[in-house]
Amino acid sequence: MDAQQTTAAAAAAAALTPKALIHQKYGTKACYRIEEVQQSVDSTCPGLVTPQQSRCLYRCYLSLPEFTTTSDTFPKKKDAEQSAAKMAIEKLGIQSTSKNLTPQEAWDELATRLSVLFSEEFLSSSHPLVGHFRVSLGRIGDHFGMIPVSAIVSCDVKVNNLCKVINPNSDGDPLLVSSYIRKAAKMSDSVCSTDEGFLIRKSGSYSPNILQKLMNHALCTRCSVQIEAIHIPFRDEAQIDIVTLDFSDDQYYMDEISQKLRSRDTSQILVSRTLGKASSEMKLYFSAPEIPAAPSDCVDVFSKAEQNDHLEPVLNKRASYLSGQRIYGDAILANVGYTRKSSDLFYEDVSYCTYYRMLLSKVPDGHYKLFREAILAAELPAVFTARSNWKGPLPRDLLCTFCRQHWLSEPIFSVKMVDPSESSCKLLEACKSSKLLRLSEEIKKTNGGIGVTIDGDLGKSSTFTCEVKLLSRKQVLILDSLSDATYKKESDAIQNAALKVLTWLKKYFSQLDMSIEKLSSFGLADNIVIYSANFSKEFATLLSICGPEQNYPMRRCGASGSNFLDQPHIKEKGTSLLKIEGPDSGVFPSHGSLTCISYVVTLIRKEEPLKEVIERNDEFEFEVGSGAVINQLEVSATQLSVNQSAQFTIELPSRDLILAAAAESSKRLSHLSLNNCFLEYSIKVLRVTEPLEDRMEQALFSPPLSKQRVEFAVRHINASHSTTLVDFGCGSGSLLDSLFEHSTTLEKIAGVDISCKSLTRAAKLIHSKLSMKSVMEPNIRSAVLYDGSIMDFDSRLYGFGIGTCLEVIEHMEEDQACLFGNVVLSSFCPELLIVSTPNYEYNPILQRSSLPNKEDDPEDKSGPCKFRNHDHKFEWTRQQFEQWSVDLAGRHNYSVEFSGVGGSGDVEPGFASQIAVFRRRSLQLEKKSSTDEEPSHPYKVIWEWNKGS
Ligand code: SAH
Ligand code: MG
């Protein structure tokens, strides 16, 4: 029905899918890339994702010459593509039907649109505005057929878009939009507007038919309806309170709101855009400020008002902050309105809690806390260690949400690839100069509690960096986060870059009183360029509402994660655990582990008997050491062993935060003084998932041990001039993959593993490496991945130059490890075999450094050392490993040398990871005679690549 209204071009555009539109504009220059996203089963919202539901989702990256967009995740690839295209279109502004209109044309369109809205065809549609007509046409007297401009503003997207063309600032100013509509009504012959107030009616009369039709609908009688809404006084010091809106007897809801606002009548009511969920009808209502009757030229009412100081309307800071629009005087936040879905009024209560949660969702870490349903326990983690450890929405999504919350454009992530040859040179140097000193430093740092070495990532084959730009709605650059950190995976680069920006924003939000001058140096300290003037413009309302004296949700102790234990008062608090209960099970939440706790937070007043549970979680999992919970909680949890419980208390955080957490009791609490109150946390450690071995290796060694093992292998490959290599137990292909980044003599490489999951990952890793042409190591001509057990001999791998078996034997039973040793040296017969395995004697160092709160006490012999990984069947001392190796070498005419990585071989307790290098003594391999045996091929080729094919 509305289609006749839109211009032909817009109609054509509307018929095209976003992808088609992008194609029209960019053709092959638009490049879509789909990424598979494993939907994690570890969802922190228990019940949200059940294991059966867990499945693969897709995310699409669309690269255009100017920028890149990234879609959300979708079950279908094509939806992800369309979504990315849609975002690009929005960014380009080509979607707006009024894109090519001049302001004058927009005025005309606006007038035409109004006549359409008052046409009889329109009144037969299901447009939400029709609900307002129904009420209005049912009235008698002066107000018959009078439609409030605010009803049009809140129901019709097109008029809003047209106003934006007339003046882009109208986006943030309901008063301006309303004035434009009133003026357009004056221009139109078919409608007219009142001189005072914001009401519009049709110039002519309606046909009895249409009146009859609408009235029939209205006959459906509604019983009395009362809803709760939030009253937000314009004076900052006045508390918000609840108002009850009573729509009994078919009271027009706008009338009721205008009464509650003590406005003259509905004609004075203005309305904000929709807040919160797009599907809601949550809007702010306020009275039009007293301004001289609409000026005839009607350019910009607000700037007029600014010229007359005494007439300047009073901005409602809190309401403006919530809506990102100019809201004047007292405001009411209500969730009510007509929708397309039904001709009945839609309504819902707005509770205190909703209001405070809306406030909270605007701070950089607010959405994370809300999502985790742990407002008083969770913190935005300071580091992104691994996707599986990150609970809640990923940093990239959080940053997008933050930008949406503040009416900014979608952030732009630009991923760049760093030349790996360059970076690995740098790394080698770093690796040479570091070693012991570096290690002890790292361990000290880790002892401090929270020192996951972020630069540990440098140790991996670093390939991706990511820059993040934040832009205003009007595409003005406000923040540019340059990236120095590099990551092996593109997605890690993006997540870490997003987290860096969020972390900075969080820091900024705790110091909102900062001067514009200071802003840029505040950003530069974190390698973030702030365009101060533009930046503060975007956050202007924020500044005025969240100043230091405002009781605004923010962290209590300022500093995030990194060295909180240095703050003496925290340390003191951390140790004041009360009522520790339960036997010491010996299993502690260690650094890097995933720890699951239950907790209850109770609000307690010292003198009066006030005890109110305000937050509880029966299962709450977090990564120890990443700053994912409030400091005191982490300090306390790490002092308990599994099954132990305890209590601690903290000072009250901000009132708003308490009320956001308090759900049902927030209404009652909001009337109480919270003086002399404190919070008591009762926690219980339910279980601890030990840190993954490689996580530990990454956190404690720089470069990470895995990287050091690769370097070790590369040295031996080149020294021996081998051209063939087989990696026994290749896992996810970390070695094979890195071989493409090193200049070696290798031409043919193969990997064997029994885990199909790991092999798939390996294939993906190598495959993506191969698709980057510049990265290709020219010598390697073929690569194969086999599914099979390394206890079985496969003749295709006979007589290879080098065999590697890194951190594998400890995953088998000891007798199987012996069997493997025999098979490999007697049947596969590589010239060189490199076997690595953990050094059990090194474990105390690892474990000491992973218990943040245990002092380095030599007397402390708390229990036997456990293995580094749940999957390890054994871990050997140096002596045990040497015994195994020497026996094996002797049996098969090999020599053996011992070495290792991590730490030093000369200092007790030796290397962290011990390595044996076996060398075949007989240089000539006796050709296996053809009569000897049939070629045996028990391995299954999983993935294969040959150069040139
Ligand atoms: N070498 C890799 C992976 C080490 S984890 C790295 O350094 O990163 C140990 C690997 O050994 C696992 O992937 C496991 O699936 C594999 N593995 C264990 N027993 C095996 C067997 N009998 N045959 C083949 N692979 C085995
Ligand atoms: Mg292992």
Image: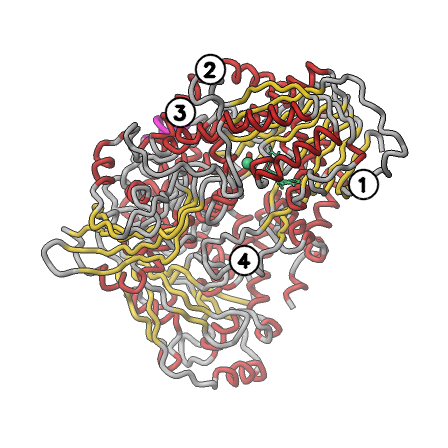
Residue 519 in the magenta stretch? The answer is: yes
Name the residue: 55% across, 58% down.
51
The alpha-carbon separation of the residues under discs 3 and 1 comes to 59 Å
The alpha-carbon separation of the residues under discs 2 and 3 comes to 41 Å
What amino acid is at disc 4? Val
Of callouts 4 and 1, the N-terminal one? 4
Of callouts 2 and 1, the N-terminal one? 2
The alpha-carbon separation of the residues under discs 2 and 1 comes to 43 Å
Judging depth in this view, the residue of 349 and 127 nearest the camera is 349
Q: Main secondary structure of the magenta part?
A: helix
- Residue that mark 2 sits on: 906
Q: Position of residue 941 (x, y in %)?
A: 77, 41
Mark closer to the observer (4, 2): 2
What amino acid is at disc 2? Asp
Is 292 on the left-hand or right-hand side of 436? left
What amino acid is at disc 3? Ala
What is the secondary structure assignment of the residue under circle 4? Answer: helix
Q: Residues within 10 Å of mark 1 (few under 14, many from 20)?
A: some
Of callouts 2 and 3, the N-terminal one? 3
